[in-house]
Amino acid sequence: MTIWPEERVPALADDGFETVDMTINVGPQHPATHGVFRMVLTVDGEKVVDCEPYIGYLHRGLEKLTENHDYRQSMGWWDRTDYLAGMACEMAYCMAVEKLGNISVPLRAEYIRVMMVELSRILSHFMFLGAFGADVGSFGTSFIYAWRERERIYDFFEEVAGDRMFPTYFRPGGVQMDLPENYQDRVRWLLGSIRQGLEDFDGLLVGNEIFVERCRGLSPVTPEQAIAWGLTGPCLRATGFKFDLRKDEPYSVYPNLTFDIPTGTSGDVFDRFMVRMAEAYQSTRIVEQCLDALSQMEGELVLNPDLPKTLRIDSGECYVRTEGTKGEYGVYALAKGGNKPYRMKLRSPSFCNLSALREMVIGTYVADAIIILGSLDIVLGEVDK
Amino acid sequence: MSKPPTPKPIDQVVKLLEQRFGKLPVTISQTATDANIDCPPGHFRAVVEELKTHRDLAFDFLRNMVGIDMLEEGLACKYQFFSYKHRHAVQVTVLTPPGNPHIPSITDLYPAANWHEREAAEMVGLVFDGHPNLKNLLLDEDVRIHPLLKAHPLQKAEILQGIEDTTPGFTF
Protein backbone atom coordinates (compact mmCIF):
# COMPACT_ATOMS: atom_id res chain seq x y z
CA MET A 1 0.00 0.00 0.00
CA THR A 2 1.38 3.41 -0.87
CA ILE A 3 0.35 6.32 1.23
CA TRP A 4 1.14 8.94 -1.39
CA PRO A 5 0.63 8.56 -5.12
CA GLU A 6 4.00 8.22 -6.87
CA GLU A 7 3.85 11.62 -8.56
CA ARG A 8 3.44 13.43 -5.22
CA VAL A 9 6.76 12.22 -3.81
CA PRO A 10 9.08 15.26 -4.03
CA ALA A 11 12.35 14.92 -5.90
CA LEU A 12 15.27 15.06 -3.48
CA ALA A 13 18.59 15.20 -5.31
CA ASP A 14 20.37 17.39 -7.89
CA ASP A 15 17.33 18.85 -9.61
CA GLY A 16 18.53 22.39 -9.41
CA PHE A 17 17.00 23.03 -6.00
CA GLU A 18 18.95 25.48 -3.94
CA THR A 19 19.62 24.34 -0.41
CA VAL A 20 20.40 26.72 2.42
CA ASP A 21 22.11 25.88 5.70
CA MET A 22 19.84 26.33 8.65
CA THR A 23 20.73 27.50 12.14
CA ILE A 24 19.22 25.74 15.14
CA ASN A 25 19.55 27.04 18.65
CA VAL A 26 19.69 24.32 21.31
CA GLY A 27 19.38 25.54 24.87
CA PRO A 28 20.07 27.13 27.29
CA GLN A 29 16.75 25.78 28.59
CA HIS A 30 16.73 22.39 26.97
CA PRO A 31 16.53 19.01 28.67
CA ALA A 32 19.14 17.46 26.40
CA THR A 33 21.85 19.94 27.37
CA HIS A 34 21.99 18.74 31.00
CA GLY A 35 21.82 22.20 32.47
CA VAL A 36 22.10 25.73 31.20
CA PHE A 37 24.25 25.12 28.16
CA ARG A 38 23.53 26.52 24.72
CA MET A 39 24.86 25.43 21.36
CA VAL A 40 24.10 26.89 17.98
CA LEU A 41 24.08 24.21 15.30
CA THR A 42 24.34 25.00 11.63
CA VAL A 43 22.73 22.14 9.74
CA ASP A 44 22.56 21.07 6.12
CA GLY A 45 19.46 18.91 6.15
CA GLU A 46 20.13 16.54 9.03
CA LYS A 47 23.91 16.92 8.94
CA VAL A 48 25.70 19.22 11.35
CA VAL A 49 27.98 21.61 9.47
CA ASP A 50 29.08 23.79 12.35
CA CYS A 51 28.56 24.01 16.08
CA GLU A 52 29.23 26.90 18.38
CA PRO A 53 28.93 26.24 22.12
CA TYR A 54 28.01 29.07 24.48
CA ILE A 55 28.71 28.66 28.17
CA GLY A 56 28.74 30.86 31.23
CA TYR A 57 25.06 30.84 32.19
CA LEU A 58 25.99 29.40 35.58
CA HIS A 59 29.11 31.48 36.15
CA ARG A 60 29.25 32.40 39.83
CA GLY A 61 32.74 33.82 40.13
CA LEU A 62 34.11 30.94 42.15
CA GLU A 63 37.72 32.05 41.80
CA LYS A 64 37.01 35.65 42.77
CA LEU A 65 35.06 34.51 45.84
CA THR A 66 37.89 32.20 46.88
CA GLU A 67 40.40 35.04 46.63
CA ASN A 68 38.27 37.10 48.98
CA HIS A 69 37.60 34.56 51.70
CA ASP A 70 39.45 32.67 54.36
CA TYR A 71 40.86 29.28 53.35
CA ARG A 72 38.26 27.41 55.38
CA GLN A 73 35.33 29.59 54.37
CA SER A 74 35.80 28.74 50.70
CA MET A 75 35.01 25.06 51.30
CA GLY A 76 31.33 25.77 50.81
CA TRP A 77 31.43 26.66 47.16
CA TRP A 78 34.04 24.23 45.93
CA ASP A 79 31.61 21.34 46.23
CA ARG A 80 29.20 23.39 44.17
CA THR A 81 31.46 23.09 41.14
CA ASP A 82 30.89 19.45 40.24
CA TYR A 83 27.65 19.21 42.17
CA LEU A 84 27.14 15.57 41.23
CA ALA A 85 30.25 14.60 43.17
CA GLY A 86 30.83 17.33 45.70
CA MET A 87 33.30 15.44 47.83
CA ALA A 88 35.68 14.85 44.93
CA CYS A 89 35.94 18.62 44.51
CA GLU A 90 36.42 19.20 48.22
CA MET A 91 39.25 16.69 48.17
CA ALA A 92 41.11 18.59 45.41
CA TYR A 93 40.62 21.92 47.16
CA CYS A 94 41.78 20.55 50.53
CA MET A 95 44.80 18.91 48.92
CA ALA A 96 45.80 22.25 47.38
CA VAL A 97 45.56 24.05 50.72
CA GLU A 98 47.43 21.25 52.46
CA LYS A 99 50.17 21.37 49.84
CA LEU A 100 50.59 25.11 50.28
CA GLY A 101 50.55 25.01 54.06
CA ASN A 102 52.43 21.72 54.54
CA ILE A 103 49.53 20.32 56.53
CA SER A 104 49.53 16.62 57.29
CA VAL A 105 46.38 14.51 57.25
CA PRO A 106 45.75 11.56 59.65
CA LEU A 107 45.65 8.18 57.94
CA ARG A 108 42.11 7.44 59.01
CA ALA A 109 40.96 10.69 57.47
CA GLU A 110 42.69 9.78 54.20
CA TYR A 111 40.82 6.49 54.05
CA ILE A 112 37.52 8.18 54.87
CA ARG A 113 38.18 10.73 52.14
CA VAL A 114 38.99 8.13 49.51
CA MET A 115 35.91 6.14 50.47
CA MET A 116 33.64 9.18 50.19
CA VAL A 117 35.24 10.28 46.92
CA GLU A 118 34.71 6.85 45.39
CA LEU A 119 31.09 6.82 46.54
CA SER A 120 30.76 10.24 44.89
CA ARG A 121 32.26 8.81 41.73
CA ILE A 122 29.59 6.12 41.75
CA LEU A 123 26.94 8.82 42.26
CA SER A 124 28.22 10.79 39.32
CA HIS A 125 28.52 7.78 37.04
CA PHE A 126 25.01 6.62 37.93
CA MET A 127 23.74 10.05 37.02
CA PHE A 128 25.49 9.65 33.67
CA LEU A 129 24.08 6.18 33.09
CA GLY A 130 20.55 7.38 33.79
CA ALA A 131 20.72 10.64 31.88
CA PHE A 132 22.50 9.08 28.93
CA GLY A 133 19.88 6.37 28.68
CA ALA A 134 17.29 9.14 28.57
CA ASP A 135 19.26 10.94 25.84
CA VAL A 136 19.36 7.84 23.69
CA GLY A 137 15.68 7.18 24.07
CA SER A 138 14.87 4.98 27.04
CA PHE A 139 13.06 8.05 28.40
CA GLY A 140 12.55 7.88 32.16
CA THR A 141 13.22 4.22 32.84
CA SER A 142 16.99 4.41 33.13
CA PHE A 143 16.68 7.61 35.16
CA ILE A 144 14.53 5.91 37.77
CA TYR A 145 16.89 2.95 37.98
CA ALA A 146 19.81 5.34 38.50
CA TRP A 147 17.91 7.31 41.10
CA ARG A 148 17.25 4.30 43.27
CA GLU A 149 20.97 3.81 43.99
CA ARG A 150 21.71 7.53 44.09
CA GLU A 151 19.11 8.14 46.77
CA ARG A 152 20.58 5.39 48.93
CA ILE A 153 24.07 6.87 48.68
CA TYR A 154 22.70 10.36 49.34
CA ASP A 155 20.96 9.06 52.45
CA PHE A 156 24.30 7.82 53.71
CA PHE A 157 25.93 11.18 52.91
CA GLU A 158 23.23 12.93 54.87
CA GLU A 159 23.93 10.70 57.83
CA VAL A 160 27.66 11.39 57.62
CA ALA A 161 27.78 15.10 56.91
CA GLY A 162 24.28 16.45 57.38
CA ASP A 163 23.75 17.34 53.75
CA ARG A 164 23.13 15.36 50.60
CA MET A 165 24.52 17.19 47.62
CA PHE A 166 26.80 19.77 49.23
CA PRO A 167 28.20 18.03 52.28
CA THR A 168 31.13 20.39 53.07
CA TYR A 169 32.54 17.44 54.95
CA PHE A 170 36.26 17.74 54.25
CA ARG A 171 38.53 20.20 56.00
CA PRO A 172 42.11 21.19 55.31
CA GLY A 173 43.88 18.65 57.54
CA GLY A 174 41.26 15.92 57.60
CA VAL A 175 37.50 15.61 57.70
CA GLN A 176 34.91 17.38 59.82
CA MET A 177 33.96 14.44 62.05
CA ASP A 178 34.13 10.69 62.25
CA LEU A 179 31.71 8.40 60.46
CA PRO A 180 28.47 7.36 62.17
CA GLU A 181 28.54 4.24 64.32
CA ASN A 182 26.92 1.77 61.97
CA TYR A 183 28.78 2.85 58.84
CA GLN A 184 30.42 -0.54 58.18
CA ASP A 185 27.10 -2.32 57.78
CA ARG A 186 25.50 0.61 55.98
CA VAL A 187 28.21 0.89 53.34
CA ARG A 188 28.55 -2.84 52.79
CA TRP A 189 24.82 -3.01 52.20
CA LEU A 190 25.13 -0.04 49.85
CA LEU A 191 27.83 -1.79 47.84
CA GLY A 192 25.63 -4.80 47.29
CA SER A 193 22.84 -2.51 46.18
CA ILE A 194 25.15 -0.62 43.81
CA ARG A 195 26.41 -3.81 42.21
CA GLN A 196 22.83 -4.94 41.75
CA GLY A 197 22.07 -1.58 40.16
CA LEU A 198 24.97 -1.93 37.75
CA GLU A 199 23.76 -5.36 36.79
CA ASP A 200 20.30 -3.94 36.15
CA PHE A 201 21.82 -1.32 33.88
CA ASP A 202 23.75 -3.99 32.08
CA GLY A 203 20.51 -5.75 31.27
CA LEU A 204 18.50 -2.61 30.62
CA LEU A 205 20.85 -0.76 28.28
CA VAL A 206 23.81 -2.89 27.24
CA GLY A 207 21.50 -5.84 26.67
CA ASN A 208 19.34 -3.67 24.44
CA GLU A 209 20.30 -3.99 20.78
CA ILE A 210 18.72 -0.67 19.81
CA PHE A 211 20.84 1.13 22.39
CA VAL A 212 24.05 -0.60 21.33
CA GLU A 213 23.46 0.00 17.62
CA ARG A 214 22.68 3.64 18.34
CA CYS A 215 25.97 4.23 20.17
CA ARG A 216 28.52 1.97 18.57
CA GLY A 217 30.85 3.63 16.09
CA LEU A 218 29.48 7.09 16.79
CA SER A 219 32.13 9.85 16.92
CA PRO A 220 35.24 7.70 17.34
CA VAL A 221 38.22 9.54 18.83
CA THR A 222 41.86 8.48 18.59
CA PRO A 223 44.23 8.90 21.55
CA GLU A 224 46.22 11.54 19.66
CA GLN A 225 43.10 13.60 19.03
CA ALA A 226 41.99 13.20 22.63
CA ILE A 227 45.30 14.47 23.95
CA ALA A 228 45.44 17.40 21.55
CA TRP A 229 41.89 18.47 22.43
CA GLY A 230 42.59 18.10 26.13
CA LEU A 231 40.19 15.26 26.87
CA THR A 232 40.81 13.56 30.20
CA GLY A 233 39.14 10.97 32.38
CA PRO A 234 36.73 8.38 30.96
CA CYS A 235 36.66 10.16 27.57
CA LEU A 236 40.42 9.67 27.24
CA ARG A 237 40.42 6.12 28.57
CA ALA A 238 37.65 5.15 26.15
CA THR A 239 40.14 5.68 23.32
CA GLY A 240 42.26 2.85 24.74
CA PHE A 241 44.81 5.16 26.35
CA LYS A 242 45.45 3.87 29.85
CA PHE A 243 45.97 6.87 32.06
CA ASP A 244 44.47 7.47 35.45
CA LEU A 245 45.93 9.96 37.91
CA ARG A 246 45.04 7.65 40.78
CA LYS A 247 47.62 5.21 39.41
CA ASP A 248 49.95 7.33 37.32
CA GLU A 249 50.50 10.29 39.62
CA PRO A 250 49.27 8.64 42.82
CA TYR A 251 48.05 10.75 45.72
CA SER A 252 46.43 10.13 49.11
CA VAL A 253 46.20 6.38 49.91
CA TYR A 254 45.53 5.19 46.37
CA PRO A 255 48.93 3.40 46.14
CA ASN A 256 47.76 1.03 48.92
CA LEU A 257 44.60 0.05 47.10
CA THR A 258 44.06 -2.52 44.37
CA PHE A 259 41.89 -1.64 41.42
CA ASP A 260 41.94 -1.83 37.64
CA ILE A 261 41.68 0.95 35.09
CA PRO A 262 39.06 0.07 32.49
CA THR A 263 39.79 1.23 28.96
CA GLY A 264 37.90 1.14 25.70
CA THR A 265 39.17 0.46 22.21
CA SER A 266 37.77 2.92 19.69
CA GLY A 267 36.84 5.95 21.79
CA ASP A 268 33.29 6.03 20.48
CA VAL A 269 30.18 6.86 22.46
CA PHE A 270 29.57 3.24 23.43
CA ASP A 271 33.09 2.89 24.84
CA ARG A 272 32.64 6.03 26.93
CA PHE A 273 29.50 4.51 28.37
CA MET A 274 31.13 1.16 29.11
CA VAL A 275 34.24 2.72 30.67
CA ARG A 276 32.09 4.65 33.15
CA MET A 277 30.12 1.57 34.01
CA ALA A 278 33.28 -0.45 34.63
CA GLU A 279 34.74 2.42 36.65
CA ALA A 280 31.74 2.46 38.94
CA TYR A 281 32.30 -1.21 39.57
CA GLN A 282 36.02 -0.64 40.33
CA SER A 283 35.01 2.09 42.77
CA THR A 284 32.98 -0.43 44.76
CA ARG A 285 36.18 -2.50 45.06
CA ILE A 286 38.06 0.53 46.39
CA VAL A 287 35.33 1.32 48.91
CA GLU A 288 35.44 -2.26 50.15
CA GLN A 289 39.19 -2.06 50.78
CA CYS A 290 38.76 1.29 52.53
CA LEU A 291 36.19 -0.28 54.85
CA ASP A 292 38.61 -3.08 55.73
CA ALA A 293 41.37 -0.57 56.45
CA LEU A 294 39.06 1.66 58.48
CA SER A 295 37.94 -1.21 60.68
CA GLN A 296 41.59 -1.59 61.77
CA MET A 297 41.84 1.97 63.04
CA GLU A 298 38.62 2.71 64.86
CA GLY A 299 38.72 5.68 67.20
CA GLU A 300 41.77 7.34 65.67
CA LEU A 301 41.91 11.04 64.89
CA VAL A 302 40.23 12.28 61.75
CA LEU A 303 41.42 15.90 61.86
CA ASN A 304 44.91 17.23 62.34
CA PRO A 305 44.83 18.62 65.92
CA ASP A 306 47.79 21.01 65.53
CA LEU A 307 46.10 23.43 63.17
CA PRO A 308 45.75 27.08 64.19
CA LYS A 309 42.35 28.74 64.37
CA THR A 310 43.09 30.75 61.25
CA LEU A 311 45.17 29.23 58.50
CA ARG A 312 47.85 31.64 57.34
CA ILE A 313 50.15 30.65 54.53
CA ASP A 314 53.23 32.77 53.81
CA SER A 315 53.98 31.91 50.24
CA GLY A 316 53.82 29.03 47.87
CA GLU A 317 52.57 27.84 44.55
CA CYS A 318 51.23 24.48 43.49
CA TYR A 319 49.12 22.77 40.90
CA VAL A 320 47.35 19.82 42.52
CA ARG A 321 45.64 17.35 40.22
CA THR A 322 43.22 14.64 41.18
CA GLU A 323 41.21 12.17 39.17
CA GLY A 324 37.81 13.76 39.40
CA THR A 325 34.73 11.99 38.19
CA LYS A 326 34.82 13.68 34.78
CA GLY A 327 38.58 13.80 34.28
CA GLU A 328 41.56 15.65 35.64
CA TYR A 329 40.26 17.96 38.35
CA GLY A 330 43.14 20.31 39.07
CA VAL A 331 43.52 23.23 41.44
CA TYR A 332 46.20 25.83 40.91
CA ALA A 333 46.92 27.81 44.06
CA LEU A 334 49.19 30.76 44.72
CA ALA A 335 49.65 32.15 48.24
CA LYS A 336 51.32 35.41 49.13
CA GLY A 337 50.73 35.61 52.87
CA GLY A 338 47.62 36.22 54.91
CA ASN A 339 44.59 34.06 55.45
CA LYS A 340 43.39 34.17 51.85
CA PRO A 341 44.88 32.70 48.68
CA TYR A 342 46.25 35.22 46.18
CA ARG A 343 44.88 33.23 43.26
CA MET A 344 43.07 29.94 42.93
CA LYS A 345 42.17 28.45 39.59
CA LEU A 346 40.08 25.43 38.87
CA ARG A 347 41.09 23.20 36.00
CA SER A 348 37.69 21.87 35.28
CA PRO A 349 37.56 18.59 33.33
CA SER A 350 34.07 19.25 31.97
CA PHE A 351 35.22 22.62 30.63
CA CYS A 352 38.12 21.05 28.75
CA ASN A 353 36.11 18.07 27.50
CA LEU A 354 33.36 20.38 26.30
CA SER A 355 35.81 22.51 24.32
CA ALA A 356 36.27 19.50 22.02
CA LEU A 357 32.54 19.27 21.30
CA ARG A 358 32.72 21.28 18.09
CA GLU A 359 35.26 18.94 16.49
CA MET A 360 33.30 15.90 17.60
CA VAL A 361 29.85 16.80 16.30
CA ILE A 362 30.73 18.26 12.89
CA GLY A 363 29.68 15.78 10.23
CA THR A 364 27.22 13.86 12.42
CA TYR A 365 23.42 14.03 12.48
CA VAL A 366 21.50 16.38 14.74
CA ALA A 367 20.11 13.54 16.84
CA ASP A 368 23.64 12.17 17.25
CA ALA A 369 24.97 15.55 18.36
CA ILE A 370 22.72 15.32 21.41
CA ILE A 371 24.07 11.87 22.22
CA ILE A 372 27.68 12.97 21.78
CA LEU A 373 27.08 15.88 24.13
CA GLY A 374 25.54 13.47 26.62
CA SER A 375 28.46 11.06 26.33
CA LEU A 376 30.91 13.78 27.39
CA ASP A 377 29.13 13.81 30.76
CA ILE A 378 29.44 17.52 31.45
CA VAL A 379 28.19 19.18 34.58
CA LEU A 380 27.53 22.85 34.07
CA GLY A 381 28.44 23.93 37.57
CA GLU A 382 31.96 22.85 36.83
CA VAL A 383 32.10 24.19 33.27
CA ASP A 384 31.00 27.68 34.29
CA LYS A 385 32.75 27.86 37.67
CA MET B 1 52.43 -4.28 26.74
CA SER B 2 55.39 -2.40 28.21
CA LYS B 3 55.03 -0.85 31.61
CA PRO B 4 54.41 2.93 31.47
CA PRO B 5 57.19 5.12 32.86
CA THR B 6 56.92 6.17 36.49
CA PRO B 7 56.55 9.86 37.32
CA LYS B 8 59.88 11.66 37.17
CA PRO B 9 61.10 13.55 40.29
CA ILE B 10 61.01 17.32 39.94
CA ASP B 11 64.76 17.87 40.31
CA GLN B 12 65.43 15.58 37.35
CA VAL B 13 63.05 17.59 35.21
CA VAL B 14 64.75 20.78 36.35
CA LYS B 15 68.13 19.34 35.34
CA LEU B 16 66.79 18.31 31.96
CA LEU B 17 65.32 21.76 31.34
CA GLU B 18 68.55 23.47 32.38
CA GLN B 19 70.43 21.48 29.74
CA ARG B 20 67.95 22.42 27.03
CA PHE B 21 67.30 26.06 27.83
CA GLY B 22 70.69 27.13 29.23
CA LYS B 23 71.27 29.56 26.36
CA LEU B 24 67.91 31.34 26.44
CA PRO B 25 67.20 34.16 28.93
CA VAL B 26 64.94 31.99 31.07
CA THR B 27 65.15 31.01 34.73
CA ILE B 28 64.37 27.50 35.90
CA SER B 29 63.01 27.00 39.38
CA GLN B 30 60.47 24.76 41.04
CA THR B 31 57.12 25.11 42.74
CA ALA B 32 55.65 22.77 45.36
CA THR B 33 54.51 20.36 42.65
CA ASP B 34 56.24 21.09 39.34
CA ALA B 35 59.32 22.46 37.66
CA ASN B 36 58.87 26.05 36.53
CA ILE B 37 60.29 28.06 33.63
CA ASP B 38 60.14 31.86 33.90
CA CYS B 39 60.17 33.13 30.38
CA PRO B 40 59.77 36.61 28.80
CA PRO B 41 56.92 36.94 26.27
CA GLY B 42 59.39 37.37 23.41
CA HIS B 43 60.87 33.90 23.84
CA PHE B 44 57.66 32.15 24.78
CA ARG B 45 56.90 30.65 21.36
CA ALA B 46 60.44 29.30 21.01
CA VAL B 47 60.30 27.71 24.46
CA VAL B 48 56.92 26.08 23.87
CA GLU B 49 57.90 24.75 20.45
CA GLU B 50 61.00 23.20 21.98
CA LEU B 51 58.95 21.73 24.84
CA LYS B 52 56.51 20.16 22.42
CA THR B 53 58.84 18.85 19.75
CA HIS B 54 62.04 17.83 21.52
CA ARG B 55 62.38 14.08 21.95
CA ASP B 56 63.41 14.12 25.63
CA LEU B 57 60.79 16.68 26.62
CA ALA B 58 57.75 15.80 24.44
CA PHE B 59 55.14 17.82 26.35
CA ASP B 60 52.09 16.82 24.35
CA PHE B 61 49.30 17.88 26.71
CA LEU B 62 48.32 21.35 27.88
CA ARG B 63 46.51 20.57 31.10
CA ASN B 64 45.81 24.01 32.48
CA MET B 65 46.33 27.72 32.02
CA VAL B 66 46.03 30.50 34.60
CA GLY B 67 45.95 34.24 34.15
CA ILE B 68 47.06 36.18 37.23
CA ASP B 69 47.10 39.86 38.10
CA MET B 70 50.48 40.52 39.73
CA LEU B 71 49.63 44.21 40.42
CA GLU B 72 52.61 46.51 39.69
CA GLU B 73 54.59 43.67 38.08
CA GLY B 74 52.00 43.31 35.32
CA LEU B 75 49.88 40.36 34.24
CA ALA B 76 51.21 36.83 34.44
CA CYS B 77 50.10 33.76 32.58
CA LYS B 78 50.98 30.27 33.74
CA TYR B 79 50.81 27.20 31.53
CA GLN B 80 50.88 23.69 32.95
CA PHE B 81 52.15 21.11 30.47
CA PHE B 82 52.35 17.37 30.83
CA SER B 83 54.08 14.68 28.83
CA TYR B 84 52.20 11.42 28.52
CA LYS B 85 55.29 9.87 26.97
CA HIS B 86 57.74 10.61 29.79
CA ARG B 87 55.21 11.28 32.57
CA HIS B 88 56.69 14.58 33.64
CA ALA B 89 55.15 18.00 34.10
CA VAL B 90 56.32 21.57 33.76
CA GLN B 91 54.89 25.01 34.37
CA VAL B 92 55.79 27.92 32.11
CA THR B 93 55.35 31.39 33.59
CA VAL B 94 55.12 34.38 31.28
CA LEU B 95 55.13 37.79 32.93
CA THR B 96 53.99 40.61 30.67
CA PRO B 97 55.09 44.19 31.43
CA PRO B 98 52.39 46.59 32.74
CA GLY B 99 50.41 48.20 29.95
CA ASN B 100 51.45 45.65 27.33
CA PRO B 101 49.64 42.38 28.09
CA HIS B 102 50.42 40.64 24.77
CA ILE B 103 51.37 36.97 24.58
CA PRO B 104 51.56 34.92 21.38
CA SER B 105 48.75 32.37 21.14
CA ILE B 106 49.59 28.67 21.14
CA THR B 107 46.27 27.40 19.77
CA ASP B 108 48.03 26.14 16.63
CA LEU B 109 50.35 23.94 18.72
CA TYR B 110 47.81 22.92 21.37
CA PRO B 111 44.15 23.04 20.23
CA ALA B 112 43.19 22.62 23.90
CA ALA B 113 44.49 26.15 24.55
CA ASN B 114 41.56 27.70 22.68
CA TRP B 115 39.07 28.03 25.53
CA HIS B 116 41.76 28.47 28.18
CA GLU B 117 43.07 31.53 26.35
CA ARG B 118 39.61 32.97 25.91
CA GLU B 119 39.01 32.56 29.64
CA ALA B 120 42.30 34.17 30.63
CA ALA B 121 41.64 37.02 28.19
CA GLU B 122 38.26 37.92 29.64
CA MET B 123 39.14 37.31 33.29
CA VAL B 124 42.33 39.35 33.60
CA GLY B 125 42.63 41.15 30.26
CA LEU B 126 45.52 39.32 28.64
CA VAL B 127 45.70 39.55 24.83
CA PHE B 128 46.68 36.44 22.89
CA ASP B 129 48.03 37.44 19.48
CA GLY B 130 46.98 35.03 16.76
CA HIS B 131 44.00 33.50 18.58
CA PRO B 132 41.25 32.73 16.04
CA ASN B 133 38.28 33.81 18.14
CA LEU B 134 39.16 35.84 21.21
CA LYS B 135 35.70 36.81 22.43
CA ASN B 136 34.16 36.43 25.87
CA LEU B 137 33.51 32.88 26.96
CA LEU B 138 32.07 32.83 30.48
CA LEU B 139 30.95 36.44 30.67
CA ASP B 140 28.29 38.11 28.59
CA GLU B 141 29.58 38.88 25.10
CA ASP B 142 29.31 42.65 25.32
CA VAL B 143 30.60 43.03 28.88
CA ARG B 144 34.02 44.62 28.96
CA ILE B 145 35.17 43.95 32.51
CA HIS B 146 38.00 41.83 33.83
CA PRO B 147 36.66 40.44 37.12
CA LEU B 148 39.83 38.73 38.30
CA LEU B 149 41.89 41.91 38.31
CA LYS B 150 42.70 42.81 41.90
CA ALA B 151 41.37 46.33 41.33
CA HIS B 152 37.98 44.91 40.42
CA PRO B 153 35.67 45.06 43.46
CA LEU B 154 33.61 42.15 44.67
CA GLN B 155 30.06 43.35 44.19
CA LYS B 156 26.70 42.64 42.64
CA ALA B 157 26.61 41.69 38.98
CA GLU B 158 23.78 44.17 38.36
CA ILE B 159 25.97 47.08 39.35
CA LEU B 160 28.76 45.92 37.06
CA GLN B 161 26.42 45.70 34.11
CA GLY B 162 24.88 49.09 34.85
CA ILE B 163 21.42 47.63 35.40
CA GLU B 164 21.14 48.64 39.01
CA ASP B 165 22.28 52.17 39.62
CA THR B 166 23.23 52.15 43.29
CA THR B 167 26.37 52.27 45.31
CA PRO B 168 28.09 48.92 45.94
CA GLY B 169 26.00 46.95 48.37
CA PHE B 170 28.38 44.75 50.25
CA THR B 171 32.10 44.35 50.69
CA PHE B 172 34.07 41.59 52.32
Image: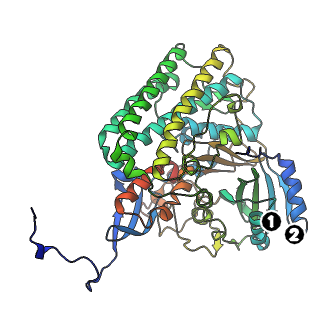
x, y (%) of residue A198?
44, 32
Q: CA distance from mark 1 to mark 2?
A: 9 Å
The image quarter containing residue A57 is bottom left
Q: Is residue A87 left or right of residue A40?
A: right
Provide the secondary structure element on which disc 1 rests.
Answer: strand
Above or below, comparing residue A284 to residue A95 in the picture: above
Q: Which labelled disc corresponds to residue B24?
A: 2
The disc numbered 1 marks a residue on which chain? B
Image quadrant containing the N terminus of chain A: bottom left
Q: Which residue is mark 1?
A: B39
x, y (%) of residue A244?
64, 43
Residue at coordinates 37% horizontally, 29% vertically from top-left? A148
Q: Which labelled disc corresponds to residue A77?
A: none
The disc numbered 2 marks a residue on which chain? B
Answer yes or no: are tags 1 and 2 on the same subunit.
yes
Q: Residues within 10 Å of mark 2 (few under 14, many from 20)?
A: few
Above or below, comparing residue B2 to residue A259 in the picture: below
Q: Nearer the viewer, residue A335 or B130?
A: B130
x, y (%) of residue A364?
41, 64
Provide the secondary structure element on which disc 2 rests.
Answer: loop
Dots 1, 2 in contact, CB < 8 A: yes
Residue at coordinates 56% horizontally, 32% vertically from top-left? A282
Q: Nearer the viewer, residue A27 or B20?
A: B20
Amino acid type at mark 2: Leu
Q: Is residue A162 left or right of residue A262?
A: left
Above or below, comparing residue B135 to residue A336 in the picture: below
Above or below, comparing residue A25 to residue A104 in the picture: below
Amino acid type at mark 1: Cys
